[in-house]
Amino acid sequence: MTKKQTWSQRFESALHPAIARFNASIGFDIELIKYDITGSQAHAKMLAHTGIISHEEGEILSTGLEQIRQEYDQGKFQPGIDSEDVHFAVEKRLTEIVGDVGKKLHTARSRNDQVGTDTRLYLRDQIQQIRWQLREFQGVILDIAEKNVETLIPGYTHLQRAQPVSLAHHLLAYFQMAQRDWERLADVYSRVNISPLGCGALAGTTFPIDRHYTAKLLHFDHVYANSLDGVSDRDFAIEFLCAASIIMVHLSRLSEEVILWASEEFRFVTLKDSCATGSSIMPQKKNPDVPELVRGKTGRVFGHLQAMLVIMKGLPLAYNKDLQEDKEGIFDSVNTVKACLEAMTILLQEGLEFRHQRLATAVTEDFANATDVADYLAARGVPFREAYNIVGKVVKTSIAAGKLLKDLHLEEWQEIHPAFAADIYEAIAPRQVVAARNSYGGTGFVQVREAIINARTQLNGK
């Protein structure tokens, strides 16, 4: 016969075994055990601080909880499904260690505010770890950018050749995306770092607790001002999953570019053996598995965000069992984002090489300098829209003749418009095309070097 659960004096019989398994969360919320112990130690100290239990009892509880932490770290404490969740598992083991004093730990506390506290403590730590990983990712991008200020790469719009840009400028776009991710997580952190401990099941408690005392012990910035909100709020989880999804968007976009760049059609990068795989039947293949997996894993994080929104959209106040479903999505999103950041950082740092000669050739084999011809005429008094139409015709006739703009003779240029002079060739040379775009935030080499200095300052400021 299944052993009755802690609350079962209200019931005549135990849970059906299948329902017990269905109801249990110990299989995944064991991830919170260290945070549950930390939160419980703070709660025990508060109970003693306010005189709800004696200081001696508070010490006994805290010491017993620390023993559980050590047992778990050593692999000696591995609770099973009979514990239902991590909270009961810890309390049960604590009572085994310290006796009936252990039964006092749950005074003035509910699993509702307890799990909310644990989840916030967990997510708080994970946010800091992800922010540190973002800094490492940015550092690698910046290192590559510093070496490639004057390396040119075709810039695209609509996946069509548009204008050449500095490779460093291209990479710094991802630095800025990661910077927003870093800042966004800091903003999310501020709403994660609010303590629900002491909200009880939903309405607070009759005991003279000190919620600000436990918040201080646990380094929370604030406490929830409304107990109903405190136990039922998962906005912080939604915000984190949203921030995690945006991180994955950025990593996926970079992944897609690496996949394209590594293809035979582009040949902008070569994948090193340490970050590529082969085909089981095609020996010539070298596959970009790392960016492909990152691109694929992006969907699962999106899914967790969508699931969390659906969980919350119809919940009445206050706590509902539906909220047990928040944790697996949070845990998996944390693990996915961390793994993808690590993999992409390694890929950039040591898994690919830019093919500089191929890039140098690529920026000379198209009409990406056409805008510069129009700018050339506009700078000499031709209205830009008129210049735009003139150059459009030039491109059309050049394509028909199998020529690029750089192949036109000076006489041909001057037949098109008398404003053209011998300096047109310098104006449309790829390096000059890039260097000339010296507006703030542009791809001009002066601007890119300044952007690298500013990015390094951001990075060093942590």
Image (cartoon, rainbow, N blue to C red):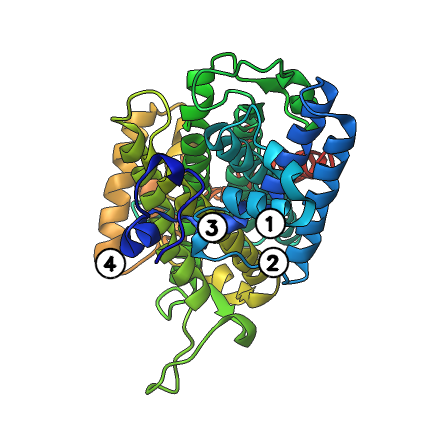
- Look at discs 4 and 2 and give the one toward the viewer: 2
- What amino acid is labelled 3 in the image? Ser
Residue on which the image places disc 4? 401
Q: Nearer the viewer, residue 99 or 283?
A: 99
Q: Quadrant of the C terminus?
A: top right
- What amino acid is labelled 2 in the image? Phe
Mark number for residue 93?
Answer: 1
Mark number for residue 83?
Answer: 3
- In the picture, residue 104 is in which quadrant? top right
Query: Disc 3, disc 2: CB below 8 Å?
Result: no
Residue density around tag 4, few if under 14, some if 14–19, many if 20 or more, within 10 Å: few
Q: How far apart are the two marked residues, 4 and 3, measured between alpha carbons?
A: 79 Å
- What amino acid is labelled 1 in the image? Arg
Q: How many marks?
A: 4
Image location of residue 445, percent across then percent down: 61, 41
Secondary structure under tag 1 reads: helix
Secondary structure under tag 2 reads: loop
Query: Disc 1, disc 3: CB below 8 Å?
Result: no
Image location of residue 103, percent across then percent down: 59, 36
> In terms of sequence position, does the residue under pointer 3 or pointer 2 come before the other?
2
Residue 208 visible, this angle:
yes
- Look at discs 1 and 2 and give the one toward the viewer: 1
Above or below, comparing residue 365 to residue 60 in the picture:
below
Q: Nearer the viewer, residue 420 or 181?
A: 181
Image location of residue 178, percent across then percent down: 54, 40
